[in-house]
Image: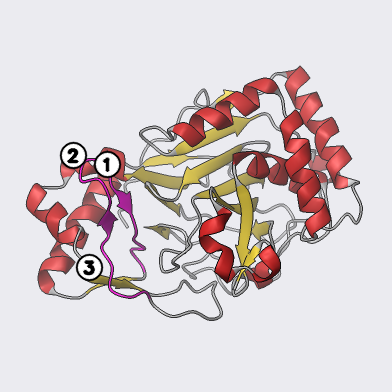
């Protein structure tokens, strides 16, 4: 990936909750966090999150509904000034496969908003199917092209190899890195497509690529041959992971390089601070991460991550008992 990083997205972008809205959100999250059995992955708890999400502040619900209808040029939904209280947060986890099993206020905030956007899902082979996952640096995995690393993370669609990859990826910041500058890189095919010549786009829309599972998956096969761009020629979806998608011929390799360059040219950097949550439209946008230096002192960068589907019916045969986890 290029070393010239894009400028950060303005802190004015997105919806900033008022103090009253933040307090309303905190009361709702506290009610959910205390809901029996106080376990995030239990059906009763997540069903409660779905119901309570109907009581989110009106402006938040309006923002989510507009985003569902059209995610815009960047495929981003950003909510700011959500309740996070650093004084009562535990140390940032450092163990591999870190997830949130016990209900907490941040996990409740993440779940409420995710359930308002769609249906929260997870993947059995990734972080044991937990619905709220921790994105944290892990000692010894600094160079990993995964959520446990701290090196520059290549642009990718989340779980690009999977037939039922997420429609949206949610990232809720509890702590940023010590410098406060670690960023999520986001780039949309809606912005990049104008930089891709027609002849190159034709190659990208042909099934001349395969994609391997990411390092975070403990099982899974590579995709069948697939196109990188699919759907409407003027507004396509994108399916690529630049660390795992393999072109099957020289012309496809050249086209993939052109696409990567175009996406880097229009990329934006989102520097999430505590209390800020972003959703990336995983059909239109790729994302990555800038490098940072973890200290493993309990105060390193810590995000909650969720995956959201718009239509659970499409993946019904992959979810045992009509649950949340895809096998």
The image quadrant where one finds the C terminus is: bottom right
Q: Secondary structure at mark 2?
A: helix
In primary-sequence order, the first of circles 2 and 1 is: 2
Q: Are marks 1 and 3 in contact (CB under 8 Å)?
A: no
> Left of 76 or right of it: where is 52?
right
The magenta segment is 223-243
Residue receiving disc 3? 207
Q: Position of residue 131 (x, y in %)?
A: 68, 59
Q: Secondary structure at mark 1?
A: loop
Residue receiving disc 1? 235
Q: Position of residue 5 (x, y in %)?
A: 36, 45
User: Mark 2 Cα within 10 Å, few/some/many (few <14, many 20+)?
Assistant: few
Main secondary-structure element of the magenta-colored stretch: loop
* Residue 24 in the image: above or below residue 272: above
Q: Position of residue 34 (x, y in %)?
A: 91, 46
Residue that sits furthest to the left in the current view: 199
> Left of 313 or right of it: where is 109?
right
Residue lying at 92% horizontally and 52% vertically, measured from the top left: 36
Q: CA distance from mark 2 to mark 3?
A: 21 Å
User: Mark 3 Cα within 10 Å, few/some/many (few <14, many 20+)?
Assistant: some
Q: Are marks 2 and 3 in contact (CB under 8 Å)?
A: no
Residue receiving disc 2? 194
Residue lying at 46% horizontally and 33% vertically, measured from the top left: 69
In primary-sequence order, the first of circles 1 and 3 is: 3
Checking the image for residue 69, the label placed there is none
Q: CA distance from mark 2 to mark 1?
A: 11 Å
Residue lying at 58% horizontally and 41% vertically, measured from the top left: 180
């Amino acid at each position: 990936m290029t070393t010239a990083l894009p400028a950060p997205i303005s802190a004015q972008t997105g919806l900033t909750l008022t103090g009253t809205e933040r307090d309303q959100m905190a009361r709702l999250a506290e009610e959910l966090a205390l809901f029996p059995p106080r376990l995030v992955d239990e059906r009763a708890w997540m069903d409660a999150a779905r119901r309570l999400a109907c009581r989110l502040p009106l402006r938040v619900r309006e923002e989510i509904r507009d985003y569902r209808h059209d995610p815009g040029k960047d495929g981003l939904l950003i909510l700011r000034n959500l309740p996070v209280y650093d004084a009562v947060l535990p140390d940032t986890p450092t163990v591999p496969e870190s997830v949130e099993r016990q209900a907490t206020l941040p996990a409740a905030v993440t779940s409420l908003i995710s359930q308002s956007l769609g249906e929260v899902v997870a993947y059995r082979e990734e972080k044991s199917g937990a619905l709220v996952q921790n994105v944290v640096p892990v000692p010894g995995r600094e160079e990993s092209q995964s959520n446990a690393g701290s090196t520059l993370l290549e642009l990718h669609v989340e779980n690009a190899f999977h037939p039922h990859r997420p429609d949206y990826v949610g990232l809720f910041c509890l702590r940023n890195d010590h410098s406060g500058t670690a960023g999520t890189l986001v780039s949309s095919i809606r912005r990049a497509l104008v930089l891709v010549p027609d002849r190159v786009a034709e190659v990208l829309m042909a099934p001349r690529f395969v994609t391997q599972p990411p390092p975070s998956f403990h099982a899974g096969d590579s995709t069948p041959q697939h196109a990188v761009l699919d759907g409407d020629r003027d507004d396509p979806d994108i399916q690529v992971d630049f660390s795992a998608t393999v072109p099957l011929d020289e012309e496809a390799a050249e086209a993939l390089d052109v696409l990567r360059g175009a996406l880097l040219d229009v990329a934006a950097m989102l520097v999430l601070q505590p209390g800020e949550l972003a959703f990336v439209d995983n059909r239109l946008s790729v994302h990555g991460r800038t490098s940072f230096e973890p200290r493993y002192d309990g105060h390193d960068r810590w995000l909650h991550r969720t995956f959201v589907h718009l239509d659970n019916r499409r993946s019904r045969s992959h979810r045992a008992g009509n649950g949340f986890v895809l096998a």
